[in-house]
Image: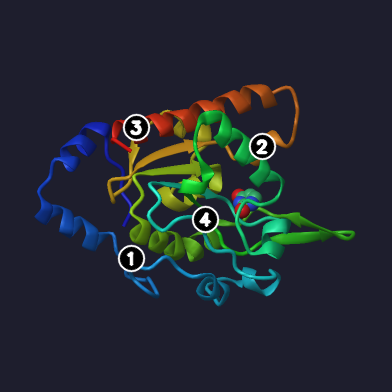
Amino acid sequence: MVGLRSALDRRRHVARTGRERAVRGAQAQPASADQPGKIPARAVIDKCRRCDLWRRATQGVAGAGPPRADVMLIGEQPGDQEDRAGLPFVGPSGKMLDRLMDEAGLDRSVCFVTNAVKHFKWESRGKRRLHRRPNVTEIEACFPWLEQEIAALQPRVIILLGATAARSLLHRTAAIESLRGRALVHASGARIFATYHPSALLRADEGAQRLRAALVHDLKRAVRALEDLGR
Ligand code: URA
């Protein structure tokens, strides 16, 4: 179950007793998890048949990063290069993300990076495989994996990269502009920061500089939140 609380509620939440925390942990276990308490392995994700995207993808792409990471970043879905490599954010968007994280002082090697949808959705254009945005049915079909990753990892901070990640975790469609800067808290207690997807910067136009500054600003807010939590 995912819910949102205000920052004030979050402070009250942090002050709760150990017994209450144990209950919270139990609630964080998704009923649909194939292996509750464990980060879903690559081989398990690869066998997912909850929607049809697996049919045209090379493989399922699981999240990657240390199993005790405090920060989880959620993207949309694997792209062409991620689909071939079996790893998230290794293509052009990933390289852009690396640069933005560097600029914000967020070390990717200590973060868990994943996607809302684990199989690549694409259409062919000549010899190229062009990304197609996953629909709500596909996003929801994939949600149990994300839920399982969060339950196993128990991150302190969750960064939503783009509208698909936001749709998945918040279960509602909202423009990133309306979510940026809001004090969102996941039912697990993790602080949520919504920002633009790094691929928006690859379509370089006159708005790219403004978008880049906004993205780095949002990542820095997440870093500060982590520091406030003593991490
Ligand atoms: N690569 C990913 O892994 N995720 C995205 O959202 C985009 C590119």
- Between marks 1 and 2, how big is the CA–CA gap? 32 Å
Q: Which residue is mark 3?
A: 227
**Which one is in front, 186 or 228?**
228
Looking at the picture, which amino acid does disc 3 mark? Glu
Q: Residue at x 22, y 63 (%)?
A: 26
Mark nearer the viewer, 3 or 2 = 3
Q: Residue at x 46, y 31 (%)?
A: 180
Question: What x and y, as percent, mark residue 166?
Answer: 48, 45
For disc 4, the neighbor class at 10 Å (few under 14, some 14 to 19, many from 20) is many
For disc 3, the neighbor class at 10 Å (few under 14, some 14 to 19, many from 20) is few
Of callouts 1 and 2, which one flags the residue occurring earlier in the amino acid sequence?
A: 1
Question: What x and y, as percent, mark residue 22?
Answer: 16, 58
Q: Which residue is mark 2?
A: 200
- Between marks 3 and 2, how big is the CA–CA gap? 28 Å
Q: Residue at x 68, y 69 (%)?
A: 57
**Which one is in front, 187 or 171?**
187
Q: Which residue is mark 1?
A: 30
Of callouts 4 and 3, which one flags the residue occurring earlier in the amino acid sequence?
A: 4
Q: Which residue is mark 4?
A: 116
Q: Secondary structure at mark 2?
A: helix
- Between marks 1 and 3, how big is the CA–CA gap? 29 Å
Of callouts 1 and 3, which one flags the residue occurring earlier in the amino acid sequence?
A: 1
